Amino acid sequence: MGITSELFDLTGRTAVVIGAGSTLGSVMAEALIGHGAHAALIVRDPEKAEEKLAPLLATGRAAVFRADAVAKTDLQRVADEIKAWSPSGRGDILLHTAGTNSATPFFDIAEDEFDRIMDVNAKSVMLACQVFGQAMIEDGRGGSIITVSSVSSGPPLSRVFTYSASKHAVNGMTQYLAREFAPHGIRVNAIVPGFFPAVQNRAILSPERIDSIMGHTPMKRFGDPKELQGAAVWLASEAASGFVTGALVRVDGGFGAMTI
């Protein structure tokens, strides 16, 4: 095996993927499995995610686990289940991809909607890092935690107030925990995707909104979910194991570098 292959080889490691039933979650899980990892696919509704996850399960290196990402008791239970299933006896990599959004105008946002989005996008990151981060610390072998932020985290996008606020919180938690966990050999980084709209999301994007996005994206196109795979594998692997922590890695077609 050459040095390039060794750097990105995840054989013997188990990736815990929260929100694995999402398009981005399943695609990034596919890449981790493709580089040798086993993947514990955590979803809230296994039946709903069954079709999307079938190709991953067919590899023989993945299993589905049911848990609500915003319920700590669920995560604690599933952490024990994963420990028993994992070839390494633990979760070596935590990839948190769960998320939700809403375009409700600011003055119309109800408290329950705000709480729901903040819970799924931000609180669940805290809970996952409490449960799986603590397990990594107790195990003593280090690890990699990868969160998923958004270009809306700053400067914030229009029309998605709560989503932008929640992703700004993800950035802050990522960098705080990078500092907190570094003495234990645990790296914490975020992938900051640009616009990777699923088919159903593209249908609700107005021509005006698309023009605005393209005008602010130097590459003049939406991203393909598979274009996130390289960043996920890199952050999980030996290629980033030495000194990459607290990073907010943009995969956004240049969106974050654009101004007038």
Image: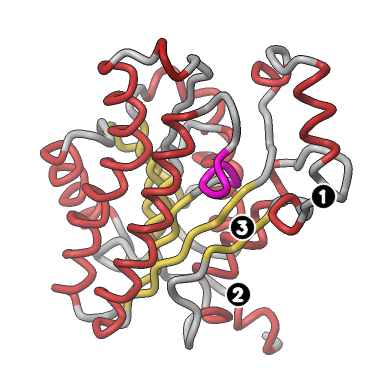
Mark 3 or mark 2, which is nearer to you?
2
Quick one: SS at disc 2? Answer: loop
Apparent side of residue 223 relative to residue 159 in the rendered image (left or right) = right
Quick one: SS at disc 3? Answer: helix
The answer to the question of whether label 1 and label 3 lie on touching residues, with beta carbons closer than 8 A, is no
The answer to the question of whether label 3 and label 2 lie on touching residues, with beta carbons closer than 8 A, is no
Residue at point 19% right, 73% down?
137
How far apart in space, not on screen, are marks 3 and 2 (Cα)? 10 Å
Residue type highlighted by circle 2 = Phe
How far apart in space, not on screen, are marks 1 and 3 (Cα)? 40 Å
Q: Which residue is mark 3?
A: 34
Quarter of the image where one finds residue 234: bottom right
Q: How far from the left and from the top, in percent, is residue 142?
A: 30, 78
Residue at point 54% right, 49% down?
154
- Look at the image and give the residue range highlighted in magenta: 151-156
Going from N to C along the chain, the mark reached first, 2 or 1, is: 2
Q: Which residue is mark 2?
A: 8
Q: How far from the left and from the top, in percent, is residue 2?
A: 71, 87
How far apart in space, not on screen, are marks 2 and 1 (Cα)? 38 Å
Residue at point 36% right, 32% down?
43
Residue 109 is covered by the magenta coloring: no
The answer to the question of whether label 2 and label 1 lie on touching residues, with beta carbons closer than 8 A, is no
Foreground of the two, 212 or 69: 212
Foreground of the two, 46 or 58: 46
Going from N to C along the chain, the mark reached first, 1 or 3, is: 3
Label 1 CA crowd tier, 10 Å (few <14, some 14–19, many 20+) = few
Q: Which residue is mark 1?
A: 260
Foreground of the two, 80 or 249: 249
- Please say if 86 is above or below 200: below
Label 2 CA crowd tier, 10 Å (few <14, some 14–19, many 20+) = many
Residue type highlighted by circle 1 = Ile
